[in-house]
Image: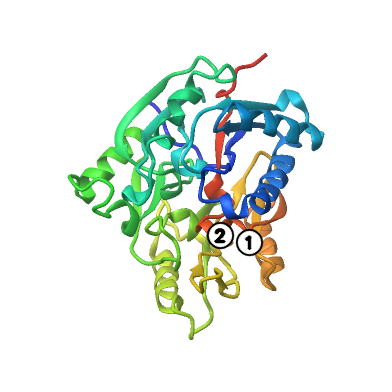
């Protein structure tokens, strides 16, 4: 067992990290549209806590600086770090932070391969080492871990339980030399978990992460699981998500009690210009210190999703952020962000 453990996302945070989109990413054809989403994200985050932004080069850093000033965000909360990047999925290439028994953080740098070498990831895999050397990061332990793992593939309740999907973590495109027991042992060792809950069912069409847990099921306070549900028998996801919901009823807390389950609604199918189904999920929300930012999709179910998430996080303000542009690159709000827990940023 590690001296450290992985906190829940609702543990006290210093900052949220974003990796800003640029013209050399797949966002190029719709850069202005997606930047608008990032601008709203930056405003919502920096009005509440610090914001760390990874900028591809000096030119982008200059542009982002001007944008933040234009948005009139508090300059002392904005930290820009120059680091070349292939893409913008901070949840998966960003650091995973564990805490010791006193709450002091340690930054872990797992190997990122763009979901099993589906895309170039050479620059993204180097971001954490450059972030660790940045002026804004405190003098805390930092460790490189020789295991392929993405932040979107794991959910912690902050109490020793980790939730993952078999489709992702047991996919031979990640750590083919390790079996389930060996992967579980490594997760418990590095993240300080007492156990791993393995979810067999659940997926989203158009998702290229091999079923990241953060698109399907999320931990919430008070032994709660928030999950994507599908009530349309004609939809291709119906049987699989029904099976997933049934699995969740069998999961028990460490104390042996069933979880409190909160289903999220199913948005109408969203498609790309080429007719490809896009992975719209309300589960891909971001938890901050006093707010939860929830992706919305100009859909009739948006308000229902916000209400259900408010039930799960009664002490947080729930805010919708229009994320239809993000799913055109097959991810959503949680995928583009990474929380940095208290103690990660240098105090002035």
Picture residue at 55% right of the left edge, 63% below the top: 281
- Residue topped by disc 2: 327
In terms of secondary structure, where does tag 2 sit?
A: helix
Q: Quadrant of residue 57?
A: top right
Question: In this image, 127 relative to 297: left or right?
Answer: left
Q: Could one spot residue 158 in this view of the protein?
A: yes
Dot 2 crowding, Cα within 10 Å, few <14, some 14–19, many 20+: many
Residue 154's label in the rendered image is none
Give above or below for 25 relative to 65. below
State whether residue 128 is above or below residue 151: above
Which residue is labeled 1 in the image? Answer: 324
Q: Residue at x 44, y 79 (%)?
A: 236
Is residue 29 positioned above or below 54 on the image? below
Mark 2 vs 1: CB contact within 8 A: yes
Front residue of 194 and 186: 186
User: On the picture, is 256 further left or further right than 215?
Assistant: left
Name the one closer to the observer, 211 or 85: 85
Task: Kindly report the distance in space between the C-alpha atoms of the residues bearing marks 2 and 1.
Answer: 6 Å
The quadrant of the image that shows the C terminus is: top right
Q: Position of residue 171 (x, y in %)?
A: 27, 55
In the displayed structure, does residue 121 sit left or right of residue 280? left
Q: Residue 185 in the image: state x and y as whole percent.
A: 25, 40
The N terminus lies in quadrant: top left
Q: Residues within 10 Å of mark 1 (few under 14, many from 20)?
A: many
**Which corner quadrant of the image does residue 59 belong to?**
top right
Question: Image quadrant of residue 243?
Answer: bottom left
Residue closest to the eye, 243 or 39: 39
- How many numbered marks have been drawn onto this rendered protein structure? 2
Q: At 38% from the left edge and 44% from the top edge, which residue is drawn? A: 120
Residue that sits furthest to the bottom in the current view: 234
Can residue 102 be spotted in the picture?
no
């Amino acid at each position: 067992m590690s001296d450290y453990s992985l906190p829940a996302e609702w543990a006290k945070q210093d900052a949220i990290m974003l990796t800003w989109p640029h013209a050399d990413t797949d966002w190029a054809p719709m850069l202005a549209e997606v930047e608008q989403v990032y601008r709203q994200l930056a405003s919502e985050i920096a009005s509440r806590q610090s914001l760390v932004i990874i900028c591809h080069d000096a030119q982008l850093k200059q542009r982002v600086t001007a944008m933040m000033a234009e948005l009139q965000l508090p300059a002392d909360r904005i930290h820009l770090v120059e680091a070349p990047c292939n893409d913008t999925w901070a949840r998966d290439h960003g650091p995973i932070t564990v805490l010791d028994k006193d709450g002091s953080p340690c930054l872990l740098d797992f190997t990122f391969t763009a979901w099993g070498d589906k895309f170039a990831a050479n620059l993204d895999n180097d971001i954490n080492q450059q972030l660790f050397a940045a002026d804004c990061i405190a003098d805390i332990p930092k460790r490189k871990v020789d295991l392929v793992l993405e932040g979107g593939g794991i959910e912690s309740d902050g109490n020793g339980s980790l939730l993952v999907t078999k489709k992702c973590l047991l996919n031979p495109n990640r750590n083919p030399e390790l079996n389930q027991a060996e992967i579980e042992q490594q997760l418990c060792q590095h993240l300080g978990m007492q156990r791993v809950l393995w979810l067999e069912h659940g997926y989203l069409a158009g998702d290229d992460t091999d079923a990241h847990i953060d698109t399907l099921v999320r931990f919430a306070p008070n032994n709660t699981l928030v999950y994507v549900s599908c009530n349309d028998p004609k939809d291709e996801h119906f049987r699989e998500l029904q099976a997933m919901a049934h699995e969740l009823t069998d999961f028990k807390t460490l104390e042996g009690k069933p979880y409190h389950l909160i289903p999220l609604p199913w948005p109408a199918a969203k498609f790309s210009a080429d007719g490809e189904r896009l992975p719209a999920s309300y589960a891909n929300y971001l938890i901050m210190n006093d707010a939860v930012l929830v992706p919305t999709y100009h859909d009739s179910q948006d308000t229902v999703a916000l209400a259900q998430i408010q039930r799960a996080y009664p002490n947080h303000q729930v805010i919708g952020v229009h994320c239809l542009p993000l799913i055109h690159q097959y991810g959503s709000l949680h995928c583009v962000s990474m929380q940095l827990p208290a103690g990660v940023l240098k105090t002035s």
